[in-house]
Amino acid sequence: MADRTFLVLGGAGMVGFEVAHQVATRLAPERVILASLPADGVARAVERLRSLVPPEVEVVGEWGDLFVREEFSRRPRRELFEDAACRRAIFEDLFGPLEAAFGRSRLARLVGAYRPDVVIDAVNTATAISYQDVYTAAAIAERDIRNLVEGRQVAPVELARNVETLILSLSVSQLVRHVLILDRALSEAGTRLYMKVGTTGTGGMGLNIPYTHSEDRPSAKLLTKTAVAFANTGLLFLMARSPGRPLVKEIKPGALIGYADVGHRAIEEKGAPVSLYAAREEALGPRLHLRLDPAGFARRAELRLPVVDTGENGVFTKGEFEAITAMGQMEFVTPEEIARLCVQEIAGRNTGRDVISALDGAVLGPSYRAGVLRSRVLQEMRSLEEQTATHSVALGQLGPPELSKLLWEAELLALAGGTLPAVLAAAPEGLSAAAVALVESRPGLRDTITSLGLPILHPDGTHLWRGPFLRIPEVAGEVEVAVGPDDRDRWAAKGWVDLRPASFARWQQRLQAMAAARRGAAQPGSAGAAPETSISDDIEIGTVVAWVLANELGGYRIK
């Protein structure tokens, strides 16, 4: 099926626009959506693109911040951080339930509204996240906390603002939440391919990079940008290894990207024009004022110079551009070359520049030797179980909580029912009663389970065997919670060993499905060897639970 709708995130930027241009002229889409932060930039990009592409291609513009909820997407980030209610809302979107944050997300709503076949993400995610400057936020918050500890007065409102700003500036939490929302939005929209235009953060240079964004070197902010850029690649690598997702690719330029324009223009810094002032002479004394009132200087005009516009990297003078693009420095690559690679990958051609594919080829996978040794490890542990009369089943320290619950339930099922055919032939009530008898007659087995934080729910559903602590429910900072009408079933499903007949009926359904899948073993040769055909009549708890994880939780590898 042809790709008809292309969503270009960062489409008003230098690279995003050129990708949209080449997509519209070479891939014959029905619609191209340009989504970027500034309204005026989007309007200009839409007008320009319409003049360059065939009239049958619909060009749509969308503006706003993709990293916040819909209602905040057209407000400056600085303004949001100054408002206490907005800060609390952003905190909830970053650290609260993912389901609610997804429903509010500007990015999720944008993808859901257009349901694009292909998404090209040319937003410089690493810069957008890392340049919120956690280092300055940390210094300010630490100063306030130290003043408070040492008895100096600190305004509570100011302290709250500065601590919350620090928390909201943390890069990893922002990136993880962003990728989780992106992943779900693309999956629900049925997007075929997600193409990321990433960054190395240093223009391809190493830790010795002599350039920064105005701060001194070595630049922690710049290296944070690199760290976020490659963390983003790592999360995309995981997306590409997850079933039910779009194809995932990334082009990662390792040079300065340029250029968009050359001209003689007014110079700006932090969004404000730079003025040309007449210099004045002063004698050096014991103190030096770093900033003086501009009114004390004769202002001549706005400062205007010949500059080259390199998009996200900023504008450079001739000298700066000549230095940064010299051989052995960043050098540079053009947006057209990046866009050409993107279009070739979208069209199915292998350019050799997809970072995700490169990682796939370089990552060390499972080995034959380890597969052979696995059998030896399991045999040694079975022998130790017999010698010590213990059950090596689950500690509860490896998540998710369902894993320990499922393993212990499978162990009780194997002990109570025996073989797979015997379990399938039994009544759920009989299996439940046999499991209770085991728990009551073997205090070592029962106490091991409960001492690990896994309660055992009695068949009547009203009593628990338990130890001093419970892993489920998970409620941060609380030692006691109310029990609602639906909580018992929810907690039992999540992490309680459930001895109710309904739980064993559910296990019989699983085992029936496993038994049905074993028919594939009748195929000749290697075709008969697959995870679903490896279930034996003996209930091997790890193999059985691995089947549940793969088929019910969707947790299996595809590469």
Image: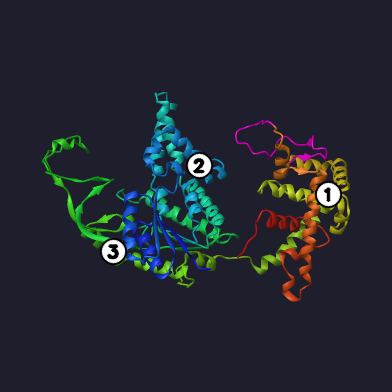
Q: Assess whether residue 61 is covered by the magenta stretch.
A: no
Q: Is residue 466 above or below residue 103?
A: above
Mark identifier at residue 325: 3
Q: Amino acid at mark 1?
A: Ala
Q: Position of residue 106 (x, y in %)?
A: 46, 47
Circle 1 — which element? loop
Residue at the spot x=15%, y=36% of the render? 295
Residue shown at 42%/53% (left/top)? 125
Residue placed most toward the observer, 422 or 291: 422
Disc 1 versus disc 2: nearer the observer? 2
**Closer to the camera in the image, 25 or 175:** 25
Looking at the image, tell me whether mark 1 or mark 2 is earlier in sequence order.
2
Q: CA distance from mark 1 to mark 2?
A: 49 Å
At label 1, counting other C-alpha atoms closer than 10 Å, the crowd grade (few under 14, some 14-19, many 20 or more) is few
Residue at the far front in the pictured view: 56
Disc sitting over residue 389 in the figure:
1
User: Is residue 333 visible from the viewing direction of this image?
Assistant: no
Give the extent of the magenta segment: 453-482
The tag on residue 93 is 2
Foreground label between 3 and 2: 2
Residue 207: image tag: none
